[in-house]
Amino acid sequence: MTSAIDGASLPSHTRIASIDKSEREAKLPRLTPRRKPPPRSRDTQPTPETPSLPPPPDLQSLTFQEPKRRILSPQDLKTFQSSHTNTLLTSFVFSLSSAAADRKISSMDLPSAPQPIHQILAILSSITSTIEECPPENQNGSRFGNPAFRSFLSALSTKSASWHTLLSVPDAAHSELSTYLHNSFGNLTRIDYGSGHELNFITWLLCLNRLSILPPSTFPALALVIFPKYIHLMRLIQKTYYLEPAGSHGVWGLDDYHFLPFLIGASQLLHHPYITPLSIHNDLILEEEADEYLYLDMVRETQSSKSVKGLRWTQPMLDDISGAKGWGKVEGGMRRMFLAEVLGKLPVMQHFLFGSLVPAAEGMGSEDEVRGMRPEEKEREGGEVEVVVDSADGTGEKEGKVVKHVHREDAWGDCCGIKIPSTVAAAQEARKNGENEGFRRIPFD
């Protein structure tokens, strides 16, 4: 029996249409079921390891000196990043963070702490008393830095020698260590504070370690007693003298002033049974646990100084980080951020000071060779500078190295000396006027 549908029996126009359809189907791509792509890891970079901390140097081979800036160009920064000193700083900071792992602040037995820990606490208490001796001037409502801060720093410099004698620092090293301590509280000229000043305090502790005054056995106390005490002291200084943030980006969306409390604080919470990264949005957990954990304490403090409630609007990076699956991801990210955004950023490290205990690498620049470069405490502008060869007398006959300010395209005016009032100052002025509730504007006066 022949088929009912026989091509030979079909009309000619039907056969042509059938052939065209077959050709079109042959040209169509073959449909295949889609395969589910493999899950992509959001954290593809390995967590930086903690380098071994080298033993203290032989002090007989050192000549103590006043620390000065040595990173003056991108090439200097590259030289620093491959240097022994970069490894030394990284090792010390990461060792402090590791010493705080899975520990509350209250876990420290302070009465049995080594004598240098009590001596440093006494120094920080003396600095607190110095604030009372140098009250702020009347601001007349201004939110910018209070000039009395300069008197405060001058008072610290007169007491520094006695403090270092208390710590049994050799007399020849007083000037070197005093420079780091003096620069731990802000800039004398700009009346501002940022992560670079925070790094100066860490470097001061590192110098005490290099002098064998703070051995590794003291690291838990440094991370959980001394550093939190310093952070709370800085908050008092910021609120008293209205220190301006050293930059307008709020330290990458974490905090207006600090970075390291987030690294050490994340290490504290590494394996916590119920506090997760998302817990920073829980007001009850912040109220009950912030006194024990630096990370939560920083979140609580920064929220209290903002005019809008909600990290989504005030600290967007903190809000993003809260979505991490665990504190291990957060701590690893903070380590990478410290290397990239502190030790690896030219606008930050151009203000870092090198001496004999934290030496510069061979081949790095020197501020003594550069015409027009002021000492760090007298630097009027933050941000990035560039060292170029220019005519020394305008005639072209003499040449020398001069420093020029770099205008950053990614900054909002602060690189050119435009002052940015702090939210801490705005909150303090609002409280003075009885405006404790609701939104607080930050006027650019």
Image (tube, rainbow, N blue to C red):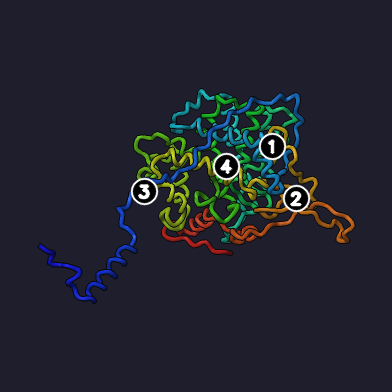
Side of 302 where 381 appears, left or right? right
> Is residue 103 or residue 6 the one in the foreground?
6
Amino acid type, residue under disc 3 in the picture: Pro
Mark 4 or mark 2: which comes first in sequence? 4
Q: Which label sits in the foreground, 4 or 1?
A: 4
Q: Nearer the viewer, residue 335 or 102?
A: 335
Mark in front: 4 vs 2: 4
Q: Nearer the viewer, mark 4 or mark 3?
A: 3
Kindly identify which residue carries mark 4: 339
Foreground label between 3 and 2: 3
Q: Where is residue 60, by image quadrant?
A: top right
Identify the residue position indicated by label 3 in the image. Answer: 37
Q: Are marks 4 and 2 in contact (CB under 8 Å)?
A: no
Q: Are the residues at dot 1 and dot 3 in contact (C-beta closer than 8 Å)? A: no
Q: Earlier in the sequence, mark 2 or mark 1?
A: 1
The quadrant of the rendering that contains the N terminus is: bottom left
Q: Is residue 291 visible?
A: no
The picture places residue 85, in percent across and down from the top left corner, at 66, 35
Residue displayed at 60% across by 27% down? 214
Q: Residues within 10 Å of mark 2 (few under 14, many from 20)?
A: few
Position above or below: 5 against 380: below
- Callout 1 secondary element: helix
Q: Quadrant of the C terminus?
A: bottom right
Instruction: Identify the residue position indicated by label 2 in the image.
Output: 374
